[in-house]
Image (cartoon, rainbow, N blue to C red):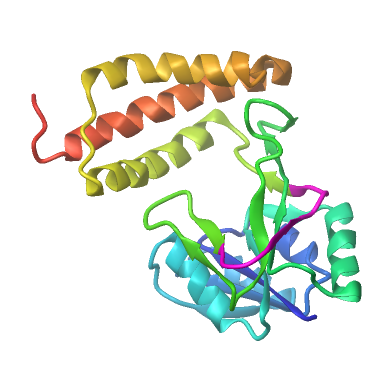
Amino acid sequence: MKISATIITFNEERNVARVIESLRCCDEILVLDSGSNDRTVEIANKLGARVVEASWHGYAAQKNIAAQLASHDWILALDADESLSEALEAEIWQIKKSGPKYDGFTVPRLAQYLGRWILHSGWHPDRKVRLFNKHKAKWVGEFVHESVLVEGTVGHLNSNLLHFTCNSLSEHLRTMDNYTTLAAQEIASQEKSISFAKLLFDPPWTFFRTYVLKAGFLDGVEGLAIAYMAALYNFVKYSKARMMSPGRKA
């Protein structure tokens, strides 16, 4: 069993070394870059990755392109702000040794937010398919929140994939602006109507669900920030979707 790691990048000089250096269990590291103007490509080349440049086609499409360009059938797909924990690396080594029993594997993600590891707030275990046979799986999702669809059997690994999210609230707000636009475009493409009641009641419900029902209060001040930001995300997403709707009312 040989594994190609795939990473899509755009101006990821802050993160790309960390993710590449965590991929010792892989037989190839493919970085698909979409026009970075920082040191991303330089760093990736120095660390032995195979760098391919391609124009941007959207998150799912870009990741499917990377998988097809990879030399091996098995893909370990990571984002630039992620890395393997040592325990997860050991699990993957064991799969390579014994041979895969499934067509894809989910991994739990452990996120670091504002410098703190988040164990609640609906953020953990946050399982995602990241190791898969590219002939049995593909990325789906036209706009945002892309995921891997496996046409076969799926197993589950136990160790965490580490996800290094925002270091500051300012960074979170910048990221949110981009993702809410994509999410609103997805809603608008489905011609879903967004009522004023949804704008009014969904954000406070999101805060309550995140902070209370999903125990965000156990994540300290960072959990409070996550709950507020989740509420704001939904308000902005739905507001943008209403603005995009051709039949919207003033």
Q: Is residue 93 left or right of residue 4?
A: right
User: Is 89 placed above or below 111 here?
Assistant: below
Residue at the extreme front: 152
Query: Residue at 41% of width from left, 43% of height from top?
Result: 179
Residue 226 falls in image quadrant: top right
In the rendered image, residue 117, in percent from the top left (x then y), is placed at 75, 33
Q: Is residue 183 left or right of residue 33?
A: left
Q: Is residue 79 left or right of residue 173?
A: right
Q: Based on the picture, tell me whether residue 101 belongs to the magenta stretch.
A: no
In the rendered image, residue 230, in percent from the top left (x then y), is placed at 49, 26
Query: Residue at 64% of width from left, 57% of height from top?
Result: 129
| Quadrant position of the N terminus in the picture | bottom right
User: Is 106 placed above or below 248 here?
Assistant: below
Q: Based on the picture, tell me whether residue 155 belongs to the magenta stretch.
A: yes
Residue 109 falls in image quadrant: top right
Disc count in the image?
0
In this rendered view, identify the residue nearer to me: 152 or 81: 152
Magenta range: 150-161
Can the viewer see residue 15? no
In this rendered view, identify the residue nearer to me: 196 or 229: 196
Can the viewer see residue 110? yes
| Quadrant position of the C terminus in the picture | top left
Query: Residue at 43% of width from left, 14% of height from top?
Result: 204
In the rendered image, residue 48, in percent from the top left (x then y), is placed at 73, 78
User: Is 225 placed above or below 174 here?
Assistant: above
In the rendered image, residue 120, in percent from the top left (x then y), is placed at 70, 26
Query: Residue at 33% of width from left, 43% of height from top?
Result: 181
